[in-house]
Image: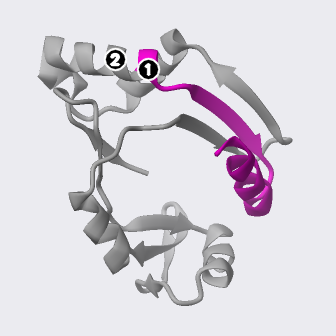
């Protein structure tokens, strides 16, 4: 879900953290990941029922293994399956809106993000359920 992009090299560094699951996503994740470490079930929150998945040892170890990004993917749940290319200009805007330090990095952040959207293809997918999303991502890989 989150990565850190090195502004100098463009390499992506994994940034594993708790994965927040909400409502109907909880039993889906439990079925797909029976060996995962789950946090407690939190019911009655303003967002409904919540549960977190703890990153596994492999995810933590991957923090030390940067890689060049191969694709930027913008998923959207709850719609009929569809896939489309995302132009660099749209990817740039969408990424600046979700970046936590783009403004703080100023020109350095602008240059890093410009290089990322120029060099890495971006796709958007809509999907109605988890299996459809997994199948779509596998086809794009």
Q: Where is residue 69 in the image (x, y as percent from the top left)?
A: 42, 38
* Residue at the (47%, 26%) spot, across then down: 120
Q: Start and end of the magenta stretch? A: 117-141
The residue furthest bottom is 35
For residue 55, say whether it is visible: no
Q: Position of residue 118 (x, y in %)?
A: 44, 15
How many numbered discs sit on the rendered protein? 2
Image-based side of 32 in relation to 79, left or right: left
Which quadrant holds residue 84?
Answer: top right
Q: Is residue 50 above or below residue 127?
A: below
* Residue at the (14%, 22%) spot, across then down: 105
Which quadrant holds residue 32?
Answer: bottom right
The kind of secondary structure element at disc 1 is helix
The kind of secondary structure element at disc 2 is helix
Q: Are marks 2 and 1 in contact (CB under 8 Å)?
A: yes
Residue under numbered circle 1: 119
Magenta highlight on residue 120: yes
Q: Which of 27 and 8 is in front in this view?
A: 8
Image-based side of 45 in relation to 137, left or right: left
Image-based side of 95 in relation to 35, left or right: left
Which quadrant holds residue 75?
Answer: top right
Question: Colour scheme used in the picture?
Answer: one colour
Q: Nearer the viewer, residue 57 or 82?
A: 57
Give the CA separation, mark 2 to mark 1. Answer: 6 Å
Residue under numbered circle 2: 115
Disc on res. 140: none
Q: Where is residue 90 in the image (x, y as percent from the top left)?
A: 53, 15
For residue 70, say whether it is visible: yes
Label 2 CA crowd tier, 10 Å (few <14, some 14–19, many 20+): some
């Amino acid at each position: 879900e989150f990565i850190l992009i090195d502004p100098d090299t463009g390499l992506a560094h994994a940034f594993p953290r708790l994965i927040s699951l909400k409502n109907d996503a909880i039993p889906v994740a439990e079925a797909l990941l029976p060996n995962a470490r789950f946090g407690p079930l939190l019911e009655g929150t303003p967002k409904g029922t919540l549960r977190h998945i703890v990153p596994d040892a492999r995810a933590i170890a991957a923090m030390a293994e940067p890689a060049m990004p191969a694709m930027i993917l913008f998923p959207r749940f709850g719609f009929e399956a569809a896939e489309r290319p995302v132009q660099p200009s749209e990817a740039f805007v969408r990424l600046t809106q979700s970046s936590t330090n783009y403004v703080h990095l100023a020109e350095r952040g602008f240059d890093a993000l410009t290089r990322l959207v120029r060099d890495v293809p971006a796709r958007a997918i809509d999907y109605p359920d988890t299996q459809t999303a997994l199948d779509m991502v596998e086809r794009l890989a």
